[in-house]
Image (cartoon, rainbow, N blue to C red):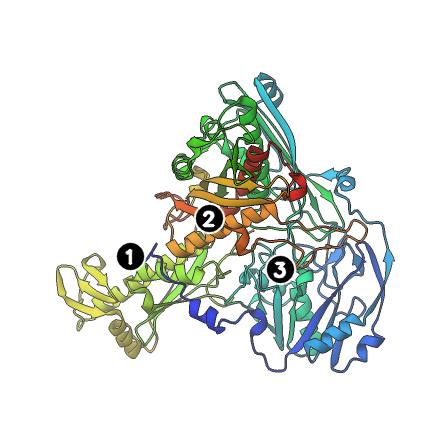
Amino acid sequence: MTSIGAPINRTDAWAKVSGAARYSAEHPVEGLAHAVLVTSSIPSGRVLRIIDTAAREVPGVLLVMTPQNAMRLPQETRDGKIQPPVGRRLTLLQEDDVYYNNQPVAVVVADTLEHARDAAARLRVEYEHKPAVLDFDEAKRSLHPPEKVLTESTDTRRGDLQAGLLAGSRRVEAIYHTPIENHNPLETHATIAQWNGDKLTVHDSTQYMKGVQKILSAIFGIPQENVTAICPYVGGGFGSKGSIWSHVPLTAMAARQLGRPVKLSLDRNQMFGPVGQRPVTEQRMRMAAMDDGRMMASSHDTIAYTSMLEDWIEPCGLMTRMMYESPNQETSHRLARMNLGTPTFMRAPGEASGSFALESAMDELAYALNMDPLDLRLKNYTERDPGKELPWSSKSLRQCYEIGAERFGWKDRDPQPRSMRRDGKLVGWGMATATYPTNRSAGQCSATILPDGTALFRSGTQDLGTGTYTVMTQIAADALGLPVERVRFELGDSQMPEAPVSGGSTTVASVGPAVQAAGHALRLKLVGIASADEHSPLSGAHPDEVGVELGELYLLADPGKRTSMLEIATRHQQAHGEPVEVTAKAEPGDASKKYSMHAFGAVFVEVEVDEDLGEIRVPRVVGVYGVGKLMNEKTGYSQLMGGVVWGISLALFEETMIDKRAGRAVNGNLAEYHVPTNADIQSIDVQIVDEDDPHVNPLGAKGIGEIGITGVGAAIANAVYHATGKRVRDLPITLDKVL
Ligand code: MOS
């Protein structure tokens, strides 16, 4: 019996389609007051005064919280600034400085949302203006290195880059740009905060409940157990909800000051700045190869913007360090400060943006060598990670290339740009490599048998809409030996056993093994109880002698001797007055020291370009991935397909445009921030290569949340070049760039 991998429907599907699933802003709370976040209208300066006379005249207004009257939080000095002890710089109205447009400057609370909105619109904020850096080229005049790139080194060097560049017979050098992009989950960030004495409960839309709990306890100087974070459903996060932003503690501050529960939802425009975004990047690539395609040198130098408040670097160079054999290589990352909100993780941070530069440059090199782009990649295929100097835990990229090329029909490609036409349009074919690292953290899970014979598993993890509820139910069912219909998996409460952030495509890899361990432990415990019970058919049995099927335990040697898990649990409950319950913890071992662990894939795309109108369409994408074992074929394919859709979006649509005078996003709404609609998406053929990886984690699952977006941007840019002969190195590839 195995339910792992089965394409079962989402266990939370009915709750979602019927509206029973409650998102953070939807929890009914007695006496709830409604807050509106007021943000700055200037990019740099100081709040001199907030005049709230008109706002206070609105009926129902309860609180206008500003830097002048906001409660004082415990403080520490960091980076020469007085800050709440949270490990990063938030805007909690403890100071009056303004560092970017759309930065929180006040919170207005009223009895209804309408009153709060009305009052917020009547606030008058007087500012002292200071010069702002709003032009990336200006910002670039002063660069600084980030301390780290995620957990990796900022810069790397192997061999002798200059010698390698000179040794190659063909060279490419090019600069690639990617724009600011903003996360736009359908559910904007939302928080409900409620105090009971010194105890705080928050309903918060987050990818990391434990993080919300820990940071709020630090900000308010109260014990961690006094904070409960609840989040059973998330309407999308994509990285923006992976860390805590200012509105969360601000809501709790307002609730504290008011002595009443308060709800605050960001409006769509407030998704553009105060809660992170993908930064602008400028990536300089250099490569050299011999006539046969052997790469002699490569370099990848990234400049990205960060805010005036904090350092956050888009880790563009990481993929370049591991993807191809290149004996001589340098990579670097530098930051340029701007008066914009702090950037953050956004689906495949680094790989989504970095693969655009790396895989475009590979295509340019292939043309310089007069070589097929796929052959160039095979020529420089890495059998071990050349950056970390470790073997791969598993790598099926060769099969991905083969299967992808076959399904796409790559061998029929005429490499000559502008050589293919259909219905009066230019047709182009391009390809690229996809990858995303496989990481893992510690996770915990509890398991028990309920009186109705179902098993309840609980872990304080999150379901971002990705299918966590469903796949954890499958893992639990397999480990315990129950059908999935009789297993319930609960998540979304910080009081549940601890789970890590749902980021970096690590939830299955981190929480899955804990769920599996809890299932095994519960089964063992039940066998032990039955074995010790002289009245049980399993009396005296050793665990190895006991089989399980559909919730029944039986003697392997004499299958007639059997008893149900429920019966054992009920008898135990009656005898001892407590349920049979276990809690298990699963932690990564030292596999990451012995192996480099990555998911890999190959993406092939076809584009059609209308030369008169500049319109670019993507009739088909073939993406083939080696991602370890899939936990659920349906939700897994959805994840990969969704990633490819976002890759198309990154290639052709998304760009946050900043007004260079005011520093505000001018398209900060879903009408003008372009994302693909169904009509923009045509055939997406996702295939999986069977992969057995015993090293990544006990489930053999690699993350699938982020790899789908990687490679797609370059594959489309490469196809556009093949179609038109125009090399676009600046995303998104809008019509003006191909006309
Ligand atoms: Mo993902 S960008 O690690 O939430």
User: In the image, is residue 112 above or below residue 92?
Assistant: below
User: In the image, is residue 46 above or below residue 173?
Assistant: below
Mark 3 residue crowding within 10 angstroms, few (<14) / some (14–19) / many (20+)? many
- First in sequence, mark 3 or 2: give its number: 3
Q: Which residue is mark 3?
A: 244
Label 3 or label 2, whichever lies nearer to me, is 2
Residue at 39% across, 35% down = 402
User: In the image, is residue 155 above or below residue 110?
Assistant: above
Question: Between marks 1 and 2, how big is the CA–CA gap?
Answer: 31 Å
Mark identifier at residue 378: none
Label 1 or label 2, whichever lies nearer to me, is 2
Label 3 or label 1, whichever lies nearer to me, is 1
Q: Which residue is mark 2?
A: 683
Question: Between marks 3 and 1, how big is the CA–CA gap?
Answer: 38 Å
Residue 29 falls in image quadrant = bottom right
- First in sequence, mark 1 or 2: give its number: 1
Residue at 45% across, 30% down = 382
Q: Looking at this view, is 387 or 2 the one in front?
A: 2
Q: Is residue 334 left or right of residue 502?
A: right
Q: Which residue is mark 1?
A: 2
Q: Amino acid at mark 1?
A: Thr
Q: Are marks 3 and 2 in contact (CB under 8 Å)?
A: no
Residue 332, how many percent across, how many down?
63, 34
Q: Secondary structure at mark 1?
A: loop
Q: Amino acid at mark 2?
A: Ser
Residue 448, how many percent across, how many down?
35, 69
